[in-house]
Image: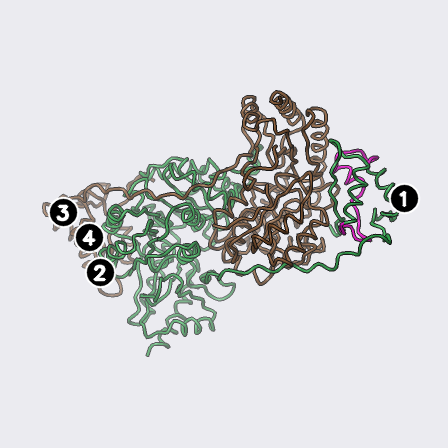
Chain colours: A brown, B green
Amino acid sequence: MSRPPYVSFSVRPRGRRPGSADIVDAVLAERARGGLPAGSRLAPVRVLEQQLGISKNTVQVAYDELVARGVLETREREGVFVADAPDAPAVPAGLEPPPLPALRPAPPMTGGGPHRDGISLSVIFIDPDLLPTEKLAECARSVLRQPGFANLYDAQGYRPLREAIAARLNARAIACDPDEVIITTGSQQALDIVARALEVRRIGIETPVYAYARLLFESLGLAITPLRLDPFAGIDLDAWDRQLAAGRPGLVYAISSFHNPTGYSYASHELAGLLELAARHRFAILEDDWGSDMLSGSEYRPMLRMLGGGNVLYVNSFTKKVLPSLRIGYLVADRALVPSLVAMKRLSTLGGAWLSEAILAEFLERGYYDGHVETMQRATDARYRACLAALEELMPDGVRWTTPGGGPSLWLELPRAVSMPALVAALAARKVWIDPTTAAFCGEPHLHGLRIGYAYPKEPELRRGLEILAEEIRRLLP
Amino acid sequence: MSRPPYVSFSVRPRGRRPGSADIVDAVLAERARGGLPAGSRLAPVRVLEQQLGISKNTVQVAYDELVARGVLETREREGVFVADAPDAPAVPAGLEPPPLPALRPAPPMTGGGPHRDGISLSVIFIDPDLLPTEKLAECARSVLRQPGFANLYDAQGYRPLREAIAARLNARAIACDPDEVIITTGSQQALDIVARALEVRRIGIETPVYAYARLLFESLGLAITPLRLDPFAGIDLDAWDRQLAAGRPGLVYAISSFHNPTGYSYASHELAGLLELAARHRFAILEDDWGSDMLSGSEYRPMLRMLGGGNVLYVNSFTKKVLPSLRIGYLVADRALVPSLVAMKRLSTLGGAWLSEAILAEFLERGYYDGHVETMQRATDARYRACLAALEELMPDGVRWTTPGGGPSLWLELPRAVSMPALVAALAARKVWIDPTTAAFCGEPHLHGLRIGYAYPKEPELRRGLEILAEEIRRLLP
């Protein structure tokens, strides 16, 4: 690996295959142009022979002639080099590097990922210990052992996985064909390709909202119509009506169950109300249903796709539920939209990691998924109950929280008197990490609090984190 | 899975935790709004208990009261349902579906992928039988067995993989730190995030060029300055100079080794010439170096990044060399650019499939890569020689081809008299599939031919495909 590469020249044969004279000409021409500074190494005979598809002898004859002319010299065990000939042009002066490109303003990045030490209170992932690593390893072994395992990829996604997803949705009374499913790198890529494929200049989004959705839409130049969501008061459909009538977005992005970051779930009349607004104001709907199956007792929540039918663009993901490092999400869209969406996915990543897709398909086919989700949900339910009990016991008056009852997080609302930057700093000093998710809001936040991810830390850790949080809140109260 | 979900209502507690009265209020309010049509199922007691974090008894008391009021009814083994009360509002009339979104014009997709039957002559992948599936399975087993295998992901990419890549580049005398490496979903994502992160409105690209690069840049609204590449005549640097002076692109995208689709490799003076133009016209360079290590005898070619230094944005990929279904590429960029590029990657896919990245890191760490590339290169060299010999033997006069000597493909140039659509149709009728790569050209193609991928089909298959190709070319010659 450490041998420097040789200088390079192009041979343009007079006939259909290069002869020695063509090689001699090419070296002389390249040297005359300054492309072969003295002392630089040429391709060894065996490499040039391979490259040009000619006999070793043809190359050797050319090199011999060039050595005889004093253009090249051979060095024992090192190869063929350009000689320091008196008529050789000077080595081109040290090249000036090309300029560095200019950057667009970078979107602000939000925190919320787990920290290596201390207690991470706002993480929205599931505790890795609750994830089915062993069973996935079993599936990976089986997939990689399949002699015919396809090494290539289908840009729409591994078909057996699309079939398994469609079958699961059909079992939930959502009509869906494998041809309408597009596998994506997490739900993020689904949002990206939808926003890039659609002829939409303005999008309606909840505020607060999943921050990377807002940042993505903005980075793609979409104008935003904010739809205020207060998880303690529910959705003010009349206010949304006015906003949507004024903004006329072509698309509304909605997280209908266990909304990130508030934990709110749309009530039935809110689901119906948004669909009614869509029909009246003629906007399409992109539903991010990351959560409808993250509910106790193998129950699941209704969602827009179920009530609104096949026109609703539907996004979901296995990231939280199976293994984040697989990075598999999916998009369900009407058949008429699929070719354009797949074309956009091609431009973005060509295809996804099919190996991951095949492992997940195997996991679903073996029936591991349902059992896993049930077990995982029991564990997160226990953490949720412990979290509610701790909040009740520890939090001072004036602190409120949502009770999502599913998904991995809830929203903790603090009295306005508690300064969020001061709280973040005080907690950081004690190695408790929170994410006030300011990037989740369009404009000035109307909520004043933080996301509590109760599914990531273990119970004693969560308890300890909430104790410290409550202490610091009390300290910051007037 | 097949049980329909229940209707949904939001409980807004008067105090910090919901009581039965809150539940009763919530159901009555939701019914008054039309959100609870008669006959719809409510959440079972145990689910609501979980969701609200209250005792089963609190829920039961509320449901009992609502049943007593005639609002709800219980059905044996089925659950709690909304009663058909005379004062209940009518079920909201069947919801009108939201409109389907409008699409932007879809980019044309190019062919060139393998066909299931017949002979695929233009495929640019390596024969899967030459890929190290067994060793990858071994690495996957080992990765998934690691107890501490990180389930989460680093948006910049799995660090051990970034370290392995930096070490390999350093061994080729290319200064590079793991912090300057960004793992991407194939090289396609690297192009996507570069084009999205940079403040660039116009880009220079070779014509012909890797078609999905051109289509991507165009879909992102970049204006194109085409840089004509004739693999039989080399690069006309004066013409490029004029084009670049006129267009003033902020960035030039160049495939310097085994150019796709022509198989051309830049000569030393062309590499230096492009760098000189970059310094003079102040454009940045994005080098797609998919090929510099796909050369015989563990040799590799010089590239722009080596001569131009750390300012050159450098893209490479393991897709062709290890396993396409891993979908791992990478981008090397100056430290100052990395935060913005990673931010763009976050918006596009958050992270990649870390499992794939870990498997590849293991593959590199165990030293499997070098041996594999050597073996693979020997096999593709043999196919290349066989391809050249067959072309020489079979092709009529007037047909020319490039002699790349590395990478998986060459360009076959036909007499203009041979109609490409007629040739494609005649070959398709005999189940021989070619891709004339018209999407690779900006404007009217100045070449008239097709890519021959000799690394994908096995020798007898390639030979048979070329025989049929030669027959049909002869038939179409006047």
Q: Secondary structure at mark 3?
A: loop
Label 2: how many Cα within 10 Å (few below 14, some 14–19, many 20+): many
Q: Nearer the viewer, mark 3 or mark 2?
A: 3
Label 3 is placed on what type of residue?
A: Pro
Image: A117 above or below A318: above
Quickly name the residue at label 1: B68
Q: Residue at x 19, y 54 (%)?
A: A62
Q: CA distance from mark 4 to mark 3?
A: 11 Å
Is label 3 on the same chain as label 2? yes
Q: Which residue is mark 3?
A: A89
Q: Which residue is mark 2?
A: A19
Q: Secondary structure at mark 4?
A: helix
Check the residue under mark 4 and report the chain it is in. A
Image: B187 above or below A376: below
Dot 1 amino acid type = Ala
Asked if one can make out residue B92 in the rendered structure from this viewpoint, the answer is yes
The crowd level at tag 3 (other Cα within 10 Å; few <14, some 14-19, many 20+) is some
